[in-house]
Image (cartoon, rainbow, N blue to C red):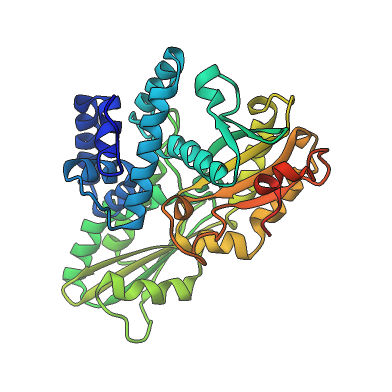
Amino acid sequence: MRKISLATAPAALIALVGSRRWASRIAALRARAAEGSRAGKVLMQRHAVEFALHRLAQSPAPGIAQPADARIAALAMEAVALSRALPPAGQARLAARLDAALSGEATLIPFFHILRSAALQRARGFEISYSGLAEEAPFDLLLTRGAAQAELACDVISAEEGREVHRGTWFRLADRVDPDLQTWLAAHPGRYLLKMTLPDGLREAGPDSADPLAALHGAIRAMLEGQTRQTEDAAAVLRLDPLLLAGAQAAEAGLMGRLRREFGPEAHLSVTAAGGGVFVMAARAGRENEVAAAVRRRLASIAPVRLSGARPGILAMFIEDTDRAEWRGLRERLELEGEARQFLTHPAARPVVAVTCTSRLELFGLPAPDAVAEGELRFRNPAHPAARTLELAPAVASSV
């Protein structure tokens, strides 16, 4: 059997999927990314693993210069080695998981989270079994160190679940409104700020509900066409004012830092520049984000079904769709710690010896302080009988 290396691992993983299936997926993602500049950037970031694998497979290099690329290639190598080691039924489950990860809104992040969790625990001295794939266990990994064992269940939760205004929906709105704002700036040169308060938030419409994106776009367009300074209804309060930030530049990149300091980390921002004019949109929900609380609710829902209860259990949470500032804020304000420790007092946490939290920043190997120095946040459950087991300490001892 041909030996794989970091340079050949991306192509080998793509071969597991099938070259035709993979090419179709990449083409579909690129087509969607071209539909809007802002939403397209978000999509490219969301599918960064897929695009990196594709790029690395197209031009394999003996030495991979970028640390993030090296991380992705190493995890691809782990995936290929895992496929070769699994029994036939496990190989079929792995193929199905990869196929699902390349469909619709799914990404490879959940699978790579499992691979990285295995690599992290192996580096800490644990023997790893992929019990979820090999034996269809409810948990993903079985950790063994000496006489001690622990079950590890990996889960991914989007930070969007704790936001009233979804970032993806916001950027789709910004792309949709952009032509109207460019027309406005051509007729009204200057610098403008449209402040929005969205009491009910902003998210994609359900199958049986009205489209809030279209309604808000219509309200903005009507406001511009009527040249009114303020309008409001139950869904939105809109106010148009001059943009008074000192020294504001027309370039979006030049403005964003000032705007973030002015409006805070939870504001949703967009800048349209045309000629010498600038139009800024800044939106807030009717209440603060509750990302950490959404993580706690997910922990409570998955603990009873993802752990057998026969061994100490670890819930490894990957918090998706966060940027550097938000991820640092969640840690520095101790929001994740508070919600995780609250969960650990809940009856559903009885089989849980520890909760861990991580993000893309750790997956891609970014340095502290943006990423967690140890690769993950860990919160030990002091009430669990195995909480002080020395063999399990590297995986369960609290990191904060």
Query: In the picture, which quadrant includes the C terminus?
Result: bottom right
Q: Return the x and y of residue 239 as percentages of the image width and height.
A: 42, 67
Q: How many marks overall?
A: 0
| Position above or below: 128 against 64 | above
Q: Return the x and y of residue 312 as percentages of the image width and height.
A: 73, 33
Residue in the foreground of this view, choosing between 99 and 257? 99
| Position above or below: 377 against 182 | above
Res 75 → quadrant: top left
Residue in the foreground of this view, choosing between 166 and 318? 318
Query: In the picture, which quadrant includes the N terminus?
Result: top left
Q: Is residue 248 left or right of residue 184?
A: right
Using the rendered image of the protein, determine whether residue 107 is visible from the camera's viewpoint.
no
Residue in the foreground of this view, choosing between 10 and 297? 10
Q: Return the x and y of residue 214 as percentages of the image width and height.
A: 34, 44
**Furthest-top residue in this view:** 89
Residue at the spot 60% in from the left edge and 60% down from the top edge: 331
Res 179 → quadrant: bottom left
Q: Return the x and y of residue 18 as percentages of the image width and height.
A: 24, 24
Using the rendered image of the protein, determine whether residue 75 is visible from the camera's viewpoint.
yes
Residue at the spot 59% in from the left edge and 41% down from the top edge: 316
Q: Is residue 151 left or right of residue 48?
A: right
Res 205 → quadrant: top left
| Position above or below: 259 against 292 | below
Q: Is residue 236 left or right of residue 380?
A: left
Residue at the spot 64% in from the left edge and 64% down from the top edge: 333
Residue at the spot 30% in from the left edge and 40% down from the top edge: 5
